[in-house]
Image (cartoon, grey):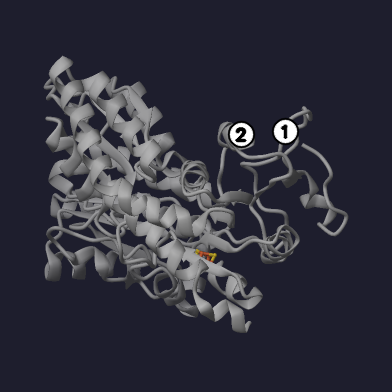
């Protein structure tokens, strides 16, 4: 990987490269953001909240000033099959007086009020920046509340400044382990835990249905449509499958060492990865019959959607895509999905990708593809223009960058309302890309 561009600020150059198969140098990644580089990443607390908030019947209490809670209110938009308690944004609303005299009293009073009014089984208490600065002992307050009310009150160590967004994922995973406990389960059931899907538009239910069709049950969903009673049974499962390894790979490793549950990385984004994931799960969990069921199911679903996909392939072949998403698994799946539609990926980056993700990205993209980690708006715009992108796939913060440049945009993150996973998701994705890339509006930009 070489040819860093002179316009990129000096400290960022090792995080950006053009794919070159002959170069031994590795892209720098999985580090704190470069100061002043205006990263697209959110803070540690936000990373923790996006992972934990989809636990539907939990009470999520943000210990900090009101802005932290407001800025992350229902930000995943995850769907629930039961309780809607998680959809609220509760805050201790720390003010100047609390900063001077400490916020523990206010936190204690808030917990009393929550228990009295909402009777939740579990409360997560998130520490924000100011709590890290003034040093409130949230561990002690949570412990006291647990004792007083005999419910679970779990501190989430996530002051915004205490690292990068990945540290927030880790804080969330630690909180989940604290909730479940560290004991192995004596009882084992023939089912799996599904980690790292946040059920943004109902994808967890899609995957659950696919697995049911081939005879495999889900014990616990972490965290999309997650429920307290199911989550604490997670140690009983035989296998963990991990959709978003960036946020929950750490939890999968912890669960392997604590509960002896092996894990595999899966992806239900795009046809190729959906099919491979189903076969992989069937091979590990099932017998000949399960594998046969999986193969039959895949064939039937493929037959249903291929004619429609062919239609979109004809309309999209030759287009160029830029990708900037949170984690590596999604970027990798999207590159394959674009390739299946005849679209070349000319720029790809992630907020929290790991070295192993970038190794795969390097292998499956063409020479000259721009690869970048923890990018900023300037870099994204610069390379989209340089490479002539027809579409950018990203999240809410990337949308204005694309539109400003007159480039089509596809939201593959929190704000979408339609399923982009599994077989149906492959059609929805192709349709959306076609609608936006081939929209006549771009002729007037
Ligand atoms: S935790 Fe800190 S960085 Fe994050 S939203 Fe609150 S004040 Fe901002």
* Residue 421 position (above or below residue 417): above
Q: CA distance from mark 1 to mark 2?
A: 8 Å
> Residue 12 — which label?
none
- Report helix, strand or loop for mark 2: helix
Q: Nearest the camera: 261 or 209? A: 209
Asked which quadrant contains residue 6, the reply is bottom right
Q: Position of residue 244 (x, y in %)?
A: 41, 43
- Which image quarter holds the N terminus? top right
- Report helix, strand or loop for mark 1: loop
Q: Report which residue position mark 2 lands on.
A: 355
* Residue 393 position (above or below residue 250): below
Q: Position of residue 76 (x, y in %)?
A: 36, 62
**Residue that lies at the very extreme toward the right in this rendered image:** 6
Q: Position of residue 17 (x, y in %)?
A: 75, 44
Instruction: Answer whether labels 1 and 2 touch (C-beta < 8 Å).
Output: yes
The mark tally for this picture is: 2
Residue at mark 2: C-beta within 8 A of ligand 1: no
Q: Nearest the camera: 395 or 39? A: 395
Q: Residue at x 39, y 45 (%)?
A: 270
Q: Report which residue position mark 1 lands on.
A: 26
Left or right of 230: which side holds 444? right
């Amino acid at each position: 990987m070489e040819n860093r561009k002179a316009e990129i600020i000096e400290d960022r150059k090792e995080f950006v490269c053009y794919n070159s198969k002959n170069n031994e140098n590795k892209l720098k990644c999985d580090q704190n953001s470069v100061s002043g580089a205006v990263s697209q990443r959110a803070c540690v607390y936000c990373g923790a909240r996006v992972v934990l908030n989809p636990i539907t019947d939990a009470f999520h209490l943000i210990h900090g000033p009101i802005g932290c809670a407001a800025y992350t209110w229902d930000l995943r938009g995850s769907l629930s099959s039961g309780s809607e308690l998680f959809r609220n944004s509760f805050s201790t609303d720390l003010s100047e007086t609390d900063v001077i005299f400490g916020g523990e009293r206010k936190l204690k009073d808030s917990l009393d009020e929550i228990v009295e009014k909402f009777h939740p089984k579990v409360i997560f208490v998130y520490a924000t920046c100011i709590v890290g600065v003034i040093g409130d002992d949230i561990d002690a307050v949570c412990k006291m509340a647990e004792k007083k009310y005999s419910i679970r009150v779990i501190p989430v160590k996530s002051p915004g400044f205490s690292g990068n967004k990945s540290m927030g994922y880790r804080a969330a995973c630690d909180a989940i382990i604290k909730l479940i406990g560290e004991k192995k389960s004596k009882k084992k059931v023939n089912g799996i835990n599904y980690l790292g899907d946040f059920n943004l538009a109902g994808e967890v239910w899609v995957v659950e249905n696919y697995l049911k069709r081939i005879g495999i049950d889900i014990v616990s969903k972490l965290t999309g449509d997650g429920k307290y009673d199911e989550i604490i049974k997670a140690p009983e499962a035989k296998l963990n499958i991990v959709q978003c390894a960036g946020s929950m790979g750490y939890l999968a490793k912890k669960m392997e060492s604590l509960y002896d549950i092996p894990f595999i990385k899966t992806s239900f984004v795009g046809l190729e990865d959906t099919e491979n994931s189903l076969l992989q799960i069937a091979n590990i969990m099932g017998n000949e019959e399960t594998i046969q069921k999986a193969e039959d199911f895949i064939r039937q679903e493929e037959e249903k959607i291929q004619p429609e996909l062919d239609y979109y392939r004809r309309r999209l072949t030759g287009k160029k895509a830029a990708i900037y998403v949170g984690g590596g698994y999604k970027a990798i799946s999207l590159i394959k999905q674009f390739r299946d539609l005849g679209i070349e990926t000319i720029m790809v980056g992630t907020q929290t990708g790991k070295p192993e993700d970038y190794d795969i990205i390097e292998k499956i993209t063409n020479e000259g593809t721009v690869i970048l980690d923890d990018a900023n708006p300037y870099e994204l715009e610069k390379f989209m223009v340089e490479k002539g992108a027809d579409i950018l796939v990203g999240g809410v913060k990337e949308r204005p960058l694309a539109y400003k440049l007159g480039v089509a945009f596809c939201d593959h993150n929190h704000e979408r309302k339609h399923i982009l996973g599994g077989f149906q998701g492959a059609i929805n994705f192709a349709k959306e890309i076609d609608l936006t890339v081939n929209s006549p509006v771009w002729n007037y930009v």
